Image (spheres, rainbow, N blue to C red):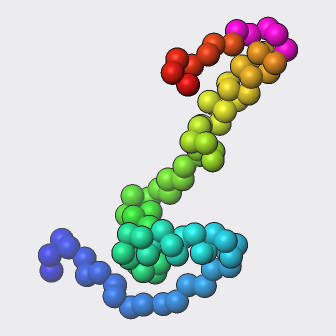
Amino acid sequence: MTAKTKMNTEKTKLTLTIDKKMKNEFSQLCEDIGLPMSAVVSALMSQAVRKQEVKLSSLDLNGFTPQEATEIRKRVKEVSEGRGRLYSMAGA
């Protein structure tokens, strides 16, 4: 027997209940990259098991980390209260 283990190829079904809008957006994303949703979900699960970790992004809708968003809100508040300094963007 070799050091390699035989990969289990027995299949089973997985049923998920998710938000309809999320399902539609994920379906479109998968279609855009040319893969069926089941293949993408299976690949994500395989990667998580192989690496023994699940990486999720904590970025908000604007692409900021929670720390960055907190800092931005703090600076906006300072400016709105007259305690900060407002700079104009060149060429904007």
Left/right of residue 71 with respect to residue 51 in the rendered view = right
On screen, residue 76 above or below 57: above
Left/right of residue 21 with respect to residue 28 in the rendered view = right
- The residue shown at (73%, 27%) is 73
Where residue 29 sits in the image (x, y, percent)? 48, 68
- Quick check: can you spot residue 75? yes
Where residue 24 sits in the image (x, y, percent)? 60, 75
On screen, residue 30 above or below 81: below
Toward the left, the furthest residue is 2
- Quick check: can you spot residue 46? no
- The residue shown at (42%, 90%) is 11
Image quadrant where residue 49 sits: bottom left
Toward the right, the furthest residue is 81
- The residue shown at (78%, 15%) is 78
Left/right of residue 7 with respect to residue 45 in the rendered view = left
Where residue 80 sits in the image (x, y, percent)? 81, 18
Q: Foreground: 59 or 34?
A: 34
Where residue 91 sits in the image (x, y, percent)? 51, 21
State which region is magenta: 81-85
